[in-house]
């Protein structure tokens, strides 16, 4: 095993997730049980600065819950209290930061390392509803309460003091705004929307989702081919200048690109009944799939920033699309394009859901037209 045993995105916990989803389909649990015994036997982190949906105890709890096998019940009960304590500590730190008026670090709230990811874990497992509501209350504040920087500039509460890489950058003393699903505002938007769909609602949630629809519609601009696209990141000057009239499309990825952001917009629109925003989101995905210049930016098969991620997002958007949409017909074609890419290029030689072969294989299984896997495992991607 590699050095990232308890990592969902890049490690063996991602392998266990794939094996467990497959075992639900074919009843063959031997491989999953071997992997589960190995990962449970190793000490798992609950460190405040390390553990997250994609690392340590929450990652393992998410995966064992997805597996849903009685053999894992005892381990899950042990993990449950540790994860709950971690969330409470993270929330306490976030509230203290909010009270100080300072900007958040990216890892405070994002999906991969922060409270959005921990909220996704709570939503998936449904064991601590009041704790999930506490996370949702925090996310409502993140969307609706601006922060002042430089003593004069007001920026959104999700504006981060970090640079796009997740750490301070000398050239960006007042940080940046991030629209992506993995590290930016699209993550909290999707969590609020998926929670509303599941009946988990807190005061201000509908207002926050309506605000999110306006925000994402406002900040989308047209590519040279006429497709809608979003900037991955923006500087403070860019925020005050306002949305560009046109933009060059970025890579159509799950993590930062137009497809992931569009899925967050669609979910928000469905949650608050905003039909124009829903159509905007679905049109953006359809245009992306029809744009060779965007598809040509994909270089690998992975979930994070490759063909697998695009296919999963498109399938999720298609499942909720307005009647008569052409998107459902695109999903089998995307699976074929992923398979064709794999015919020409070997799959990643590493473990994990996001950047490893496990995510690619799990995508193929999930989109299999004959024995399709249930999409419930995709809450960790904030797709369903």
Image (spheres, rainbow, N blue to C red):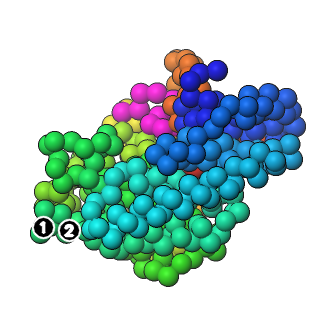
Question: If the image is split into quadrants, where does the N terminus sit?
Answer: top right
Q: Position of residue 162 (x, y in %)?
A: 28, 48
Q: Position of residue 33 (x, y in %)?
A: 81, 32
- The numbered disc on residue 148 is 2
Other-residue count near label 1 (Cα within 10 Å), few / some / many at <14 / 14–19 / ≥20: few
- The numbered disc on residue 41 is none
Between 332 and 68, the one lying in front of the other is 68
Other-residue count near label 2 (Cα within 10 Å), few / some / many at <14 / 14–19 / ≥20: some
Residue 350 in sight here:
yes
Q: How far is disc 2 from disc 1 in space, using C-alphas?
A: 6 Å
Numbered disc 1: secondary structure? loop
Q: Position of residue 198 (x, y in %)?
A: 64, 69
User: What residue appears at the point 41 percent right and 27 percent down from the top-left corner?
Assistant: 299
Relative placement, left or right, of 128 versus 118 is right
Residue 289 in sight here:
no
User: What residue appears at the point 71 percent right and 63 percent down from the top-left corner?
Assistant: 127
User: What residue appears at the point 66 percent right and 42 percent down from the top-left corner?
Assistant: 60
Q: Quadrant of residue 197?
A: bottom right
Check whether the beta carbons of the residues at disc 2 and disc 1 lie within 8 A of each other: yes
Numbered disc 2: secondary structure? strand
Relative placement, left or right, of 97 versus 152 is right
Q: Which residue is mark 1?
A: 151
Between 358 and 226, the one lying in front of the other is 358
The residues colored magenta run 297-306
Q: Is residue 130 above or below residue 51?
A: below
Question: If the image is split into quadrants, where does the C terminus sit?
Answer: bottom right
């Amino acid at each position: 095993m590699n050095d990232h045993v308890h990592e969902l995105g890049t490690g063996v916990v991602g392998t266990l997730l794939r094996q467990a989803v497959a075992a639900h389909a074919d009843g063959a649990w031997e491989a999953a049980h071997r992997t589960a015994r190995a990962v449970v036997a190793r000490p798992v982190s609950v460190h405040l600065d390390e553990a997250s949906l994609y690392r340590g105890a929450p990652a393992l709890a998410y995966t064992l819950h997805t597996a849903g096998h009685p053999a894992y019940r005892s381990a899950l009960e042990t993990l449950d209290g540790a994860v709950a304590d971690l969330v409470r500590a993270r929330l306490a730190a976030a509230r203290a930061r909010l009270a100080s008026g300072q900007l958040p670090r990216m890892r405070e709230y994002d999906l991969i390392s922060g409270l959005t990811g921990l909220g996704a874990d709570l939503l998936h497992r449904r064991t601590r509803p009041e704790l999930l509501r506490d996370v949702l209350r925090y996310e409502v504040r993140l969307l609706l309460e601006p922060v002042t920087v430089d003593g004069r500039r007001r920026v959104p509460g999700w504006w981060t003091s970090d640079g796009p890489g997740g750490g301070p950058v000398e050239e960006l003393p007042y940080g940046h705004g991030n629209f992506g699903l993995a590290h930016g505002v699209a993550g909290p938007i999707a969590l609020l929307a998926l929670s509303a769909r599941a009946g988990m609602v807190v005061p201000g949630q509908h207002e926050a989702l309506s605000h999110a629809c306006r925000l994402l519609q406002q900040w989308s601009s047209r590519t040279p081919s006429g497709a809608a696209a979003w900037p991955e990141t923006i500087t403070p000057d860019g925020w005050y200048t306002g949305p560009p009239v046109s933009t060059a499309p970025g890579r159509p990825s799950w993590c930062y690109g137009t497809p992931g952001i569009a899925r967050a917009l669609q979910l928000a629109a469905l949650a608050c009944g905003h039909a124009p925003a829903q159509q905007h989101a679905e049109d953006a995905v359809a245009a992306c799939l029809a744009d060779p210049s965007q598809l040509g930016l994909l270089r690998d098969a992975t979930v994070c920033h490759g063909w697998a991620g695009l296919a999963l997002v498109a399938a999720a958007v298609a499942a909720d699309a307005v009647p008569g949409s052409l998107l459902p017909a695109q999903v089998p074609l995307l699976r074929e394009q992923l398979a064709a890419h794999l015919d020409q290029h070997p799959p990643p030689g590493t473990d994990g859901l996001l950047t490893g072969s496990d995510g690619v294989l799990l995508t193929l299984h999930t989109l299999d037209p004959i024995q399709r896997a249930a999409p419930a495992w995709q809450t960790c991607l904030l797709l369903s």
